[in-house]
Amino acid sequence: MDPFWLAVDLVATPYMFVIIMSGVVIGVLVGALPGLSSPMAVALLIPFTITLQPVEAVALLAALYCAGTFGGSITAILINAPGAPPAAATALDGYPMAKRGEAGRALGIAAASSVVGGLLSLIVFLTAAPALASVALSFGPSEYFALAVFALSMLASISGKSSLRNLIMGFIGVLLATVGVHLTTGVERFTFDIPQLSDGIHFVPVLIGLFAMSELLTQCGAKIQMKERISSVVVKLPSIKELKALSGTILRSSGIGTFIGILPAEGATVAALLSYNEAKRFSKNKAMFGHGAPEGIAAPEAANNAATGGAMVPTLALGIPGSGTTALILAAMYAHGLQPGPYLVRETPEIMYAVFLSMIVANLGFLVVGLVGAKFFARVTLIPKTFLWPSVFCFSVIGSYAYGGVFDIWVMVVSGAIGYFLNRFHFSAAPLVMGLILGKILEETFSQAMIIHESNFLEFFESPIVLMFFLMTTLSLLWPIISAKRLARAEAKELTKMESRP
């Protein structure tokens, strides 16, 4: 049977539809709740997906990923409290529009833009992933090592204010990935005579600790803030005329979001902020931005949902995560015995098609769920923290225990404490997770390449692909410095102009 129709058979069942829609509802709910996030929900759900078939588990998590990205826009617009980081840009114009009595219109623009951005990126995903995988089939260990180094260098530009801090956290993640027995030499590293560490540190309890437990500890010390709420909400989809007026913004932002998503280690937050800035630059009504401009809602929502499809391209085709959430989905695939990469796309393309179809259903599903239940999802912010966070703690403990036993509960608790202090000192946990995923790839491919090249590192540079990735790595590391200097130079020129004025 053709792989695509085999995927249709896998997805087009009532059971699969229930799984996908469950992911959609959980995603919108998590996205709408400030403090919770899609990475946290994915990390908590991974242990509970072990009883599912691999395709079912990935479909559930992918649906949650899509819907969670949109869900943050609901509370961003209605109560000026972005439920997810990518929705921060949406709040800039969404809340002012809601305050002047156009909450329903703002939610409709957000929903329509999200769906269009998501669907366009999935078309790119369907065409780009097989093409990228076919190219990657010619990669050897040297090329994969150079690719992983490039992906690690991209950590300089993901979430967080300091590029250096992100790189430090990434390298700490790589260091943690070396714990356990080295597969090539059989040497134990950093086990401290603890038998459970011989197999390395398990992904799942670390992820649960960093995202769920650390946020629990942070919220325990946070003050309860009362948000002004928009009480009257009747969601109204934009008219054809309004969609035509916004079409340029939506298409441009979808392209930006898809491109940013494909880049290793980038994500929806970067895409949303960049698209918002570009929308403002191209707009004829720049003065309206920040005061309820429709373009200010359409741009970030189209971009952050387009980034979800884009991020799945390197995740499935190369086994390199395109964002923090896809790093967790990648960990879930490993837990289910799947090996993402070019051989998965070539040998079992039905899995890629099933993920594609699941994400299409999820995008259409959150349109319906978001429009019908926007008012309800805005009210979930009223859930007292005294009920919410103890529940998160219970799920964290159960998930960690189900995955690896009592020892993994301690790994989760320690990871949560580390994540809490990272947040306190403005370090992001996402680069650490990316480093933990990439670390194993770096170590295994480097060891294999050194065996092939008989320990001669200079032979790495005989491959043009390796040279290209190393050059891109250099540019990636230097770009934040170049950007900072350009910004400082532009500010100095502006200051000089202001001082020269009479």
Image: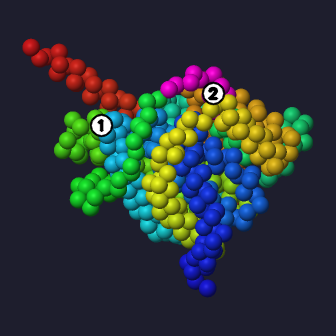
Q: Position of residue 293 (x, y in %)?
A: 28, 42
Nearer to me, 267 or 376 = 376
Identify the residue at horizontal 58%, vertical 61% (top origin). 21
Residue 16 drawn above or below residue 200: below
Scheme by which the image is coloured: rainbow
Q: Is residue 224 highlighted in magenta? A: yes
Residue kind at label 1, given as amino acid type: Arg
Nearer to me, 492 or 253 = 253
Tell me the tag on residue 100. Answer: 1
Identify the residue at horizontal 59%, vertical 39% (top origin). 36
Circle 1: element type: helix
Residue kind at label 2, given as amino acid type: Thr
Magenta range: 215-226
Quarter placement of the N terminus: bottom right
How many C-alpha atoms fall within 10 Å of the one at disc 1: few (<14), some, or many (≥20)? few
Q: Position of residue 145 (x, y in %)?
A: 61, 52
Quarter placement of the C terminus: top left
Nearer to me, 123 or 469 = 123
- 57 to the left or right of 271: right
How many C-alpha atoms fall within 10 Å of the one at disc 2: few (<14), some, or many (≥20)? some
Tell me the tag on residue 366. Answer: none
